[in-house]
Amino acid sequence: MERTLIIVKPDAVQRGLTGEVIKRFEQRGLKIVGMKFIHMTKDLAQKHYAVHEGKPFFEGLVTYITSAPVVVMALEGNNAIAAARKTIGATRPTEAEAGTIRGDYGMEIGRNLVHGSDSVENGELEVSNFFTEAELFSWDRSTDPWIIE
């Protein structure tokens, strides 16, 4: 069972796509085990994007992600990282497949609507940056036997 961090970014929130984004992950079969509506601080944004520090686009990322509220979610499921990333689509929305979040709603890389963890290790780290253990809930979903073998 893997966990991934999903961020519904400012552009998706501002465009009224929050519910649609959440719906896509739930319909895929991923389970929400934590969710918050937050206005990310500069410190948290810099920590989240630390891997990009020193790159020319770093400050723009931080400014963008702190420009408006976001929804952060911890999702759980078998192969959650791969399932979430397939649901999200390619980083460049114009290269994303139709039927993915970015393919259906995105136009530019700087406004690509959603973040999803890119590895199991980063999923664990990113979830811990946004949620305490007390904010994460393990629960049995009545549909799990129809989703998980």
Image (cartoon, rainbow, N blue to C red):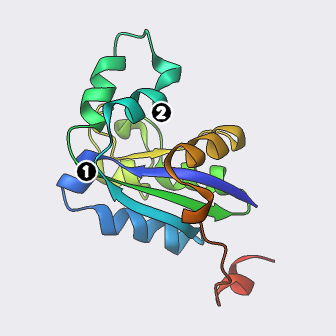
Q: Residue at x 64, y 84 (%)?
A: 141
Which element type, helix, strand or loop, lies under badge 2?
helix
| Kind of residue sitting beneath label 2 | His
Q: Residue at x 60, y 39 (%)?
A: 118
Residue that numbered label 1 is attached to: 69
Pick the residue in front: 113 or 94.
Answer: 113
Q: Residue at x 36, y 18 (%)?
A: 58
Q: Along the horizontal axis of the image, is 125 left or right of 41?
A: right
Please tell me the numbered disc located at residue 48: 2
Q: List x then y, in percent, for residue 87.
A: 51, 56
Pick the residue in front: 61 or 86.
Answer: 61
Mark nearer the N terminus (2 vs 1): 2
Q: Along the horizontal axis of the image, is 92 left or right of 73?
A: left
Q: Where is 111 relative to 25, above or below? A: above
Q: Residue at x 64, y 63 (%)?
A: 76
Quadrant for residue 142, please give it: bottom right
